[in-house]
Amino acid sequence: MSCEKRNNPCFGAAAVDKLVVVVSEFLGTAILVFVACMGCVPNTEYQVLPQQSAFTSGMAVMISIFTFGHISGAYVNPLTSICAVIVGQTPMQLLPFYLVSEFAGGISGYGLLLLVTPAQRMKFGDGSHGVCTAIPNADLTTAQALGAEIIFSVILSLANCASWDPRNFDQTDSLPLKFGLLVGTLIMTGGAYTGAIMNPVRSFAPAVWNNEWERHWIYWVGPIFSAVVVSLLYRVLVLRGKSSRNSSVL
């Protein structure tokens, strides 16, 4: 994958290059959370169509990748950042910069949404939960909710790894749109289960601002577990010693 795609950032070891990556990931994640969660804000009748929030979330991913993919890769998700490091797409020493930028960006993005939205619209119909807060369906057991979030995250992790595979070089056109549609589809199908969050930042930011932590650990364990297992297996069984498409060393 060329540097213009969803890839490893093209830069050297200079501090200014790291700063550019940090700012890129911060802004990309802030945009993702702001746009995705704005799509969950209830209308005048305090209703949100599932298709609306799913489509908006997918297009938010597309916007972030299209805008910042050529700078930092626009991972905007610890799951993706971890996958990139394990398959050799991004140097390990950059992982802390990515994670800090993503979490700071997510918290800032949701804070910006609070700033521009009337307070009464930031709660769902009965006022019990904040907009965009990740909470598993009450009918699901904890094991079922965790299993569902792992499955959604496994699919996203596989897509990440496949996009970096050198044998996939001629299949990377319109990659921002492809990832946007993939995420939107998973959210549309899994929204009634766990919300198909697949992103600890996306669940953490609303939880912080709304102080809602019901079974919140699921949204950390599911994506991180999936990222580690899938990327390790992909590196060992699929890449088998080959480098990812655009691996570089600082």
Image (spheres, rainbow, N blue to C red):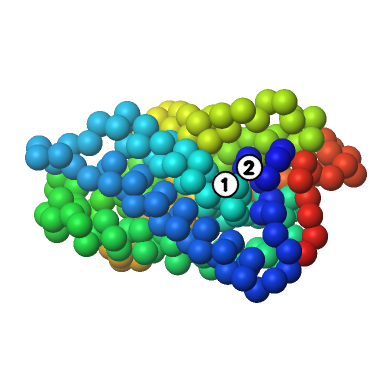
Residue pictured at 53% horizontal, 49% vertical: 68
Q: Earlier in the sequence, mark 2 or mark 1?
A: 2
Looking at the image, do the residues carrying marks 2 and 1 touch, with CB atoms under 8 Å apart?
A: yes
Percent coordinates x, y for residue 166 in the rendering: 79, 35
Residue 22 in sight here: yes
Alpha-carbon neighbours of circle 2 within 10 Å: few (<14), some, or many (≥20)?
A: some
Residue placed under numbered mark 2 in the picture: 4
Q: What secondary structure is marked by label 1?
A: helix
- 20 or 154: nearer the eye? 20
The numbered disc on residue 140 is none
Q: Nearer the viewer, mark 2 or mark 1?
A: 2
From this viewpoint, which residue is outermost toward the bottom?
A: 15
Position of 14 with respect to 185 (left or right) is: right
- 237 or 13: nearer the eye? 13
Residue pictured at 49% horizontal, 46% vertical: 67
Percent coordinates x, y for residue 114 in the rendering: 23, 60
- The vertical placement of 34 against 111, above or below, is above
Percent coordinates x, y for residue 12 in the rendering: 73, 64
Q: What secondary structure is marked by label 2?
A: loop
Position of the N terminus by quadrant: top right
- 213 or 1: nearer the eye? 1
Which quadrant of the structure image shows residue 158? Answer: top right
Amino acid bearing label 1:
Gly
Q: CA distance from mark 2 to mark 1?
A: 7 Å
Residue placed under numbered mark 1 in the picture: 69
